[in-house]
Image (spheres, rainbow, N blue to C red):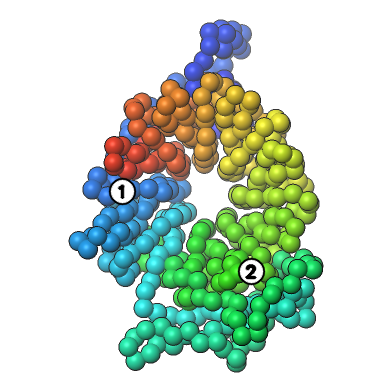
């Protein structure tokens, strides 16, 4: 399939007669060959007895999602399911302590990562203590943040303040300088009032990062081991990144796991969140003391700050040498990209432009045109309005020359649409249910369907 920006753009889920006339005239004058609209086969791939959500799909066509169910005790637990070779199966069944919680899967190729809860930590389960800002660089004085964890005679966890570990070290023995660059905290005149006997970084939870590789055909691997919540993982091959919770007064740090080696990328007083990985790079947004900015980590070049301005930059995504994010330079949000060291605004209206997704130098997002949300595409050269109708089109995703999104076709419930560069979009669903959260990979689309107390996962594959 050729690149999207080499196609002809006649878009909108519904077309007026003037569009049809224009297309017919163009076809007759230039004899352009337009392939007929694709046909898709849609099947249900999840168990009706479970509440299924958060579907994702990889470049190989492997799909994954989180499935919730109540056990005999009335406890709610969730498992991670995958769909491969025509069969759904759980990759977490019975391996996480009840009540189980396995949520927010992300996928790349045949690798799935997610956040799962583990209870009853033992001494061997603790392998990381958060590094804190070295005192000589601190604009605000901070108490020691390190804790020892031991198991008492009854098997319960006991957290004790540590006096033996420096605030600039972690349990792997790396100093702040040796373990990676950090986005330094900005100067502040607001000191944190805390008595010297008050613990600042308390344990925050038992959610840990897990990784499963279908090519290895083994049980999943737990990547993080401590008493802090680890959430929002992203993966590319052997590189995984996520955000680790501190404790009171909150905040997050960005972590990576690179082929078995764990590392803390950020060390500050603030919020660093929502990392996204592509190949050997990680992008995220972090508070700099004034507003949120975009940061980039390269395994060869360390951490660099991409934006530095007086407004919030959030929700970054990455593919190759292209970053995209939402920037709130005015009262509305705009979509910006960074490529080859240059920042460019690619949205061009005065309303909100949100939820960017990037693939192969191309960016899609939802933008408000004054009446409703529509889908926009930056094809690497120019920005094009893909849909033009009287209902909201939202939550786009792009990969392998295919774009999918949710469209409220009858202004009541949402349907799933796809577009492959042809003369018009293709509607995959037509029902009275809420179809949501579509993701695409290998020319296929997965999504969640909410149906009268049920929540199911569907897969659409192109017919041969």
Q: Is residue 25 above or below residue 161?
A: above
Position of residue 285 measured from the top left corner of the image (x, y, whole percent): 65, 56
Locate residue 58 relative to residue 44 in the image: left or right.
right
- Locate residue 93: give its quadrant: bottom left
Q: Is residue 139 visible?
A: yes
Identify which residue, 221 or 65, lies in the foreground: 65
Please give the name of the residue rendered at 71% of the width and 66% of the height, measured from the top-left corner: 183
Residue count near mark 1 (Cα–Cα under 10 Å), binned few <14, some 14–19, many ≥20: many
Identify which residue, 426 or 228, lies in the foreground: 228
| Residue bearing the label numbered 1 | 51
Position of residue 443 measured from the top left corner of the image (x, y, whole percent): 44, 38
Q: Is residue 372 above or below residue 307?
A: above
Please give the name of the residue rendered at 70% of the width and 45% of the height, measured from the top-left corner: 327
| Residue bearing the label numbered 2 | 265
Helix, strand or loop under label 2: loop
Locate residue 197 relative to residue 17 in the image: left or right.
right
Residue count near mark 2 (Cα–Cα under 10 Å), binned few <14, some 14–19, many ≥20: many
Position of residue 257 measured from the top left corner of the image (x, y, whole percent): 53, 69
Looking at the rendered image, the disc whose residue lies closer to the viewer, 1 or 2, is 1
Please give the name of the residue rendered at 31% of the width and 54% of the height, measured from the top-left corner: 68
The answer for how far apart the CA atoms under marks 1 and 2 are is 36 Å
Please give the name of the residue rendered at 55% of the width and 87% of the height, measured from the top-left corner: 161
Locate residue 300 relative to residue 416 in the image: left or right.
right
- Locate residue 345: give its quadrant: top right
Helix, strand or loop under label 1: strand
| Quadrant location of the C terminus in the rendered image | top left
Q: Is residue 170 visible?
A: no
């Amino acid at each position: 399939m050729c690149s999207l920006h080499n196609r002809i753009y006649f878009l909108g889920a519904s077309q007026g007669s003037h569009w049809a006339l224009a297309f017919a005239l163009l076809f007759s004058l230039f004899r352009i060959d337009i392939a007929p609209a694709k046909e898709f086969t849609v099947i249900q791939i999840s168990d009706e007895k479970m509440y299924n959500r958060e579907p994702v799909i990889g470049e190989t066509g492997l799909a994954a999602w989180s499935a919730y169910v109540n056990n005999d005790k009335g406890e709610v637990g969730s498992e991670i399911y995958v769909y491969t070779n025509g069969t759904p199966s759980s990759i977490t069944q019975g391996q996480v302590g009840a009540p189980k919680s396995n949520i927010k899967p992300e996928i790349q190729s045949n690798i799935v990562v997610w956040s799962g809860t583990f209870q009853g930590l033992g001494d061997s389960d603790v392998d990381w203590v958060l590094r804190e800002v070295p005192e000589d660089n601190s604009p605000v004085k901070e108490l020691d943040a390190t804790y020892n964890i031991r198991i008492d005679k009854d098997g319960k966890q006991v957290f004790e303040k540590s006096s033996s570990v420096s605030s600039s070290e972690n349990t792997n023995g790396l100093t702040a300088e040796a373990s990676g660059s950090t986005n330094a905290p900005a100067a502040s005149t607001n000191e944190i009032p805390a008595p010297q006997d008050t613990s600042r970084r308390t344990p925050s939870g038992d959610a840990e990062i897990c990784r499963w590789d279908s090519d290895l055909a083994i049980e999943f691997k737990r990547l993080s081991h401590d008493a802090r919540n680890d959430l929002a993982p992203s993966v590319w091959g052997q590189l995984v990144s996520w955000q680790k919770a501190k404790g009171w007064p909150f905040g997050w740090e960005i972590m990576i796991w690179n082929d078995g080696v764990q590392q803390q990328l950020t060390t500050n007083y603030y919020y660093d969140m929502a990392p996204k990985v592509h190949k050997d790079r990680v992008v995220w947004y972090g508070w700099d003391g004034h507003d949120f900015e975009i940061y980039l980590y390269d395994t060869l070049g360390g951490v660099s700050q991409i934006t530095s301005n007086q407004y919030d930059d959030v929700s970054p995504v990455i593919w190759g040498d292209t970053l995209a994010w939402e920037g709130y330079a005015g009262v509305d949000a705009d979509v910006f990209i960074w490529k080859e060291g240059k920042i460019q605004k690619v949205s061009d209206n005065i309303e909100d432009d949100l939820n960017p997704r990037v693939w192969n130098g191309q960016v899609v997002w939802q933008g408000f045109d004054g009446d409703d949300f529509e889908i926009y595409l930056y094809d690497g050269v120019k920005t094009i309005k893909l849909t033009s109708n009287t209902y909201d089109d939202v939550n786009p995703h792009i990969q392998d020359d295919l774009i999918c999104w949710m469209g409220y076709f009858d202004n009541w419930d949402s349907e799933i649409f796809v577009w492959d560069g042809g003369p018009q979009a293709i509607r995959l669903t037509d029902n009275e249910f809420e179809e949501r959260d579509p993701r695409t990979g290998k020319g296929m689309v997965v999504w969640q369907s909410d149906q009268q107390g049920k929540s199911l996962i569907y897969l659409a594959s192109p017919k041969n």
